[in-house]
C-alpha cells in the first residue's frame, strides 16, 4: 500500500529528521566531552577558601556557591573533597607550599598572591562569574590542567547555570537557604538544643538532602535512619521527610541523654553522639571500653579517636572488653569531621 505525502508534510518530515540528527550529534558530543575528563589521581583533595580578615559574613554566599560547585566536582570524580574556610594569612600560603593543602581558592579580582610566593604558584581559570579560582604549587601542574578541563566543561552544564541563577546578585550577603527542609530542620533542632545548621550539616553528610536514598544496611531517607529504630519512637513512614527527621532527632536525643548520664560533658557529647549515630551505640560502647582498658578517659572524644584505628586488628575479636569484634572505624572518624566541617561552612554562609 503506497503513502502519498504532500510537499508541506515532506518539509515537516525532513525538518524532524534534521532536528533528530542534530540532537544525536549534540548528545554524542556532550558524552565525548564528559567521558574525556582528565582523571583526578588524588582520592582526597584538600582545598581552603581564603577570606579577608573581618569579612566572613560578606563572604558567606561566595563560600556557599563554591561549596555547591565542588560538591558536583566530588560526585563527578568520585573523590573526597575536604573544604575549609580560613582568613587570608601568610600561614595559609606556607601550608600550600608544604603540601598540607592541594590548593587555595582566592578571588581573582580582590585577592593577591603574596610577592614571595608569586613565582612558586600557578592558578586555574575562574570557577564562577565571581572570578574565584584555584591557586596551586607550580609542581601541581597536572592537577591544575585537570581542574581547568573540568571547569571549562562544568560551566556549560545545567547544574552550573542553575547555581549561577540562584546566587546571582547575592554574593555580599548570606545564602538564602541550605535545603528545602530548612523549616523542618529548624523545628526539630530545638529538641536537641542544637544550632539548626549543625543538624543540617548532619543531614547533608548522611544523604545530601536526598529523601529517597537507602543504604545496603537498611538506612533510609534524609537522616539514614533504620525502620526498627523509628518504630521504637512510634514512627512508621520514614520515607516522609518530616517523619524521617523526627525519628533521627529522637534517636540522637536518646543517645545524648545516655552519654550525659555516663558523665560525658558538653564538649564531648556531640561528637561522641554523632559517631555513635554513624557506627551504632554498640560499637561506641566497645570503643569506650577499650579506651578505659588502655588507661584513657573513655568520655573524651579525642581519646576515642585515638583508639578507633587500633580496633581494626584481628586480636580485637578475642578481647573480653569488645562485644562486636574488630572495628574498621576510619569512616566514622571522617564522618564526624565532615559534619563539623560542613557546620563551620554553614555558620559563615547561612543566617542562624
Image: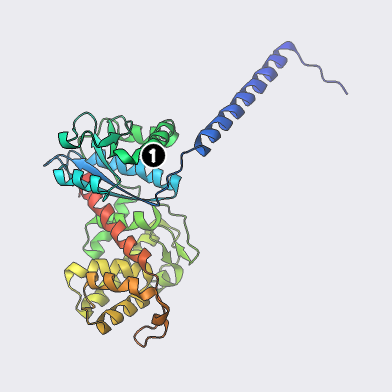
Q: Residue at x 32, y 65 (%)?
A: 333
Depth order, front residue of 38/226: 38
Nearer-the-camera pick, 344 or 237:
344
The quadrant holding residue 338 is bottom left
Total numbered circles? 1
Q: Is residue 171 left or right of residue 17?
A: left
In this picture, residue 23 sits left or right of residue 249: right
Q: Residue furthest right?
A: 1
Dot 1 corresponds to which residue?
142
The location of residue 178, given as percent across then percent down, is: 30, 47
Choose top left, top right, bottom left or bottom right for residue 150: top left
Q: Residue furthest top?
A: 7
Measuring from the top left, give residue 172's x and y in whole percent: 20, 35
Where 37 falls versus 208 (above or below)?
A: above
Q: Is residue 351 visible?
A: no
Task: Tell which residue pokes out farthest to the left in this image.
Answer: 54
Answer yes or no: is residue 69 visible: yes
Callout 1 crowding tier (Cα within 10 Å): few <14, some 14–19, many ≥20: some
Classify 270 as above or below 114: below
Q: Helix, strand or loop at disc 1? A: helix
Q: Position of residue 300 (x, y in %)?
A: 21, 73
Residue at screen point 33% across, 35% down? 166
Which residue is at 32% across, 58% downward?
A: 202
Q: Is residue 332 left or right of residue 198?
A: right
Closer-to-camera residue (210/185): 210
Picture layout, residue 96 above or below residue 287: above
Locate residue 14, reporting x and y percent.
68, 18
Give the quarter of the image for residue 301. Answer: bottom left
Depth check: give the residue in front, 260 or 240: 260
Amino acid at each position: 500500500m503506497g503513502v502519498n505525502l504532500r510537499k508541506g508534510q515532506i518539509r515537516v518530515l525532513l525538518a524532524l529528521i534534521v532536528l533528530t540528527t542534530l540532537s544525536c550529534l549534540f548528545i554524542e558530543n556532550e558524552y565525548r566531552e564528559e567521558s574525556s575528563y582528565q582523571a583526578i589521581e588524588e582520592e582526597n583533595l584538600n582545598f581552603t577558601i581564603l577570606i579577608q580578615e573581618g569579612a566572613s559574613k560578606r563572604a558567606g554566599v561566595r563560600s556557599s556557591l563554591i561549596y555547591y560547585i565542588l560538591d558536583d566536582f566530588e560526585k563527578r570524580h568520585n573523590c573526597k573533597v575536604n573544604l575549609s574556610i580560613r582568613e587570608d594569612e601568610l600561614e595559609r600560603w606556607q601550608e600550600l607550599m608544604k603540601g598540607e593543602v592541594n590548593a587555595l581558592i582566592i578571588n581573582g579580582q580582590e585577592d593577591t598572591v603574596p610577592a614571595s610566593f608569586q613565582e612558586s604558584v600557578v592558578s586555574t581559570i575562574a570557577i564562577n562569574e565571581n572570578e574565584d579560582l584555584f591557586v596551586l604549587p607550580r609542581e601541581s601542574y597536572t592537577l591544575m590542567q585537570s581542574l581547568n578541563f573540568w571547569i571549562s566543561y562544568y560551566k556549560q552544564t545545567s547544574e552550573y547555570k542553575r547555581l549561577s541563577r540562584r546566587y546571582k546578585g547575592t554574593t555580599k550577603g548570606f545564602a538564602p537557604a541550605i535545603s528545602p527542609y530548612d523549616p523542618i530542620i529548624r523545628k526539630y533542632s530545638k529538641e536537641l538544643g542544637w544550632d539548626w545548621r549543625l543538624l543540617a550539616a548532619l543531614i547533608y553528610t548522611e544523604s545530601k538532602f536526598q529523601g529517597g536514598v537507602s543504604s545496603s544496611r537498611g538506612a533510609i531517607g534524609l537522616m539514614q535512619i533504620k525502620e526498627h529504630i523509628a518504630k521504637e519512637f512510634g514512627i512508621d513512614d520514614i520515607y516522609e521527610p518530616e517523619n524521617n527527621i523526627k525519628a533521627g532527632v529522637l534517636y540522637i536525643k536518646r543517645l545524648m541523654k545516655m552519654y550525659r548520664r555516663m558523665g560525658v560533658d558538653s564538649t564531648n557529647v556531640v561528637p561522641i553522639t554523632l559517631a555513635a549515630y554513624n557506627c551504632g551505640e554498640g560499637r561506641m560502647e566497645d570503643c569506650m571500653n577499650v579506651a578505659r582498658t588502655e588507661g584513657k578517659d573513655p568520655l573524651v572524644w579525642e581519646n576515642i579517636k585515638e583508639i578507633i584505628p587500633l580496633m581494626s586488628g584481628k586480636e580485637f575479636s578475642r578481647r573480653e572488653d569488645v562485644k562486636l569484634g574488630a572495628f574498621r572505624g576510619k569512616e566514622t572518624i571522617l564522618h564526624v569531621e565532615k559534619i563539623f566541617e560542613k557546620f563551620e561552612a554553614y555558620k559563615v554562609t547561612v543566617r542562624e
